[in-house]
């Protein structure tokens, strides 16, 4: 690690601490040449995920979009935000572990729905209504009937 003060490449680690979320490690280093201390962070490098939309457009994966869509579906429901954040992390890890660099919005929607279903039934139906673009009450009734059959 290059010292930000003198540019020397030799340093030693004085202290290491994990971040609260466990996603990075904070390291205090001391330059061997000038004895000044500086901080570095070590994180796991993840490959970028591209989301393929229904119209064929591509954009970078944004976990906040998934989280926000679930928050909207859970509006005025007793669902803990920590559960939604956990689901979002599970979905992101599932995609990363699949080693596919592109994922369709259809696949993302299915991943969200399979995790929302056991958490809150009303939120599941709300999310499905937007995801599946229900045009009338018949779409709602059909989805609710399928839900009840699988229950």
Image (cartoon, helix red, strand yellow):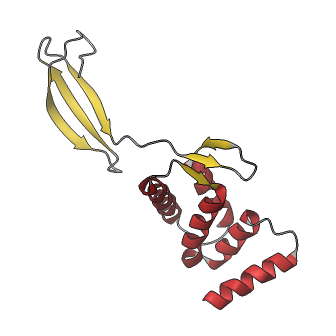
Q: Does 149 sit above or below residue 135?
A: below
Determine if residue 70 is in view: no
Quadrant the C terminus occupies: bottom right
Which percent across, then down, holds residue 75?
Answer: 67, 65
Q: Residue at x 28, y 15 (%)?
A: 4
Which percent across, then down, holds residue 108?
Answer: 60, 59
Residue 118 falls in image quadrant: bottom right
Residue 145 falls in image quadrant: bottom right
Q: Does 44 sit above or below residue 118?
A: above
**Towards the viewer: 9 or 80:** 9
Count of marks, rendered view: 0
- In the orientation shown, which residue stands out farthest toward the top? 6
Q: Is residue 48 left or right of residue 135?
A: left
Q: Is residue 79 left or right of residue 143?
A: left
Determine if residue 22 is in view: yes
Which percent across, then down, holds residue 86?
Answer: 46, 62
Which percent across, then down, holds residue 107?
Answer: 61, 61
**Towards the viewer: 98 or 87:** 98
Q: Residue at x 69, y 67 (%)?
A: 127
Q: Is residue 6 left or right of residue 126?
A: left
Q: Residue at x 27, y 27 (%)?
A: 39
**Towards the viewer: 80 or 107:** 107
Q: Residue at x 15, y 11 (%)?
A: 34
């Amino acid at each position: 690690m290059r010292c930000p003060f003198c540019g020397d490449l030799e340093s030693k680690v004085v202290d290491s601490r994990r971040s609260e979320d466990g996603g990075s490690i904070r390291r205090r280093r001391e330059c061997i040449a000038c004895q000044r201390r500086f901080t570095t962070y070590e994180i796991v490098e993840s490959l970028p995920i591209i989301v393929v939309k229904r119209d064929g457009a591509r954009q970078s994966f944004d976990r906040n979009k998934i989280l926000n869509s679930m928050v909207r579906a859970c509006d005025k429901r007793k669902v803990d935000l920590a559960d939604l954040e956990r689901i979002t992390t599970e979905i992101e890890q599932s995609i990363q572990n699949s080693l596919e660099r592109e994922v369709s919005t259809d696949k993302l929607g299915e991943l969200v729905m399979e995790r929302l279903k056991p958490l809150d039934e009303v939120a599941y139906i709300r999310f499905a209504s937007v995801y599946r673009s229900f045009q009338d009450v018949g779409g709602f009734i059909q989805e609710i009937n399928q839900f009840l059959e699988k229950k």
